[in-house]
Amino acid sequence: MSLLIASQIVLWVAVLVLGIVCIALARQIGVLHQRIAPAGALSIRQALKVGDAAPQMTLSTLEGIALQVGGVRAGRSQLILFLSPDCAICQSLLPSVRSAQGAERQWLDIVLASDGGSVEKHAAFVRDKALGNFPYVLSEALGRSLGVAQLPYAVLIDEAGKLAASGLVNSREHLESLFIAKEIGVSSIQAFIAQREQKRASSGE
């Protein structure tokens, strides 16, 4: 009987120690989340700056429908995602783009764009990936005017026709960071973090 009581005491002590360890680990995870910077779209140097008027063009989609890119748009922003049928990362990003189309539909229109390849190749890409719900344009001039050098690349134009955010988008987090950057009024998440660190340094924190 005494052995049974002793084993029960040891068991409860072990459970209490395990609980304390779990609480300590949870606290450390919280600290790490605060220290790790959010993953933002990878901004690159380009002629257009946030706040500049984006080029305004009227382009034709693959279906032959006229589409206005840029310009004032009655309370709606426009996300232009540059991709290619041959880009594996672009294809892996498509589920996130579809999700964003539904989640941000109250204020955002998404346009898919590319600047190379035949119309037939891109039309087949649209069919294979079920992208018929997105306007899809082919325009080398559009990519050049927005400074697109690598793919996948996204440009967010606000309702006033001005550049709100842009950058390389290799993941869902990168894509969503453009929306956050627009919301808080910075060029990118990296710029926001730099501003925050500068304020901390100046205040002596």
Image (cartoon, helix red, strand yellow):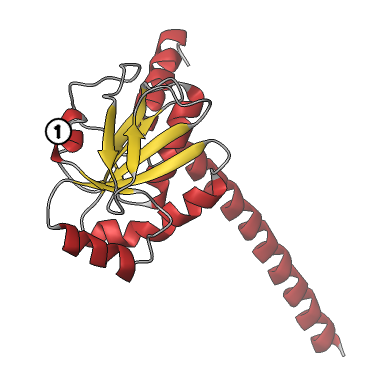
Farthest right residue in view: 1
Q: Position of residue 34 (x, y in %)?
A: 51, 38
Residue 59 vs residue 72, the one in the foreground: 59
Residue 98 falls left or right of residue 150: right
Q: Position of residue 81 (x, y in %)?
A: 31, 44
Farthest top residue in view: 202
Residue 12 vs residue 78, the one in the foreground: 78
Quarter occupied by the N terminus = bottom right
Rendered image quadrant of residue 89: bottom left
Q: Say if 147 sits above or below 17 in the image.
A: above
Q: Residue at x 47, y 9 (%)?
A: 203
Q: Is residue 42 visible?
A: no
Dot 1 amino acid type: Arg
Question: Pointer 1: residues within 10 angstroms few (<14), some, or many (20+)?
Answer: few
Name the residue carrying label 1: 144
Residue 143 vs residue 153, the one in the foreground: 143
Q: Say if 138 sits above or below 148 in the image.
A: below
Q: Position of residue 161 (x, y in %)?
A: 38, 22
Residue 79 falls left or right of residue 60: right
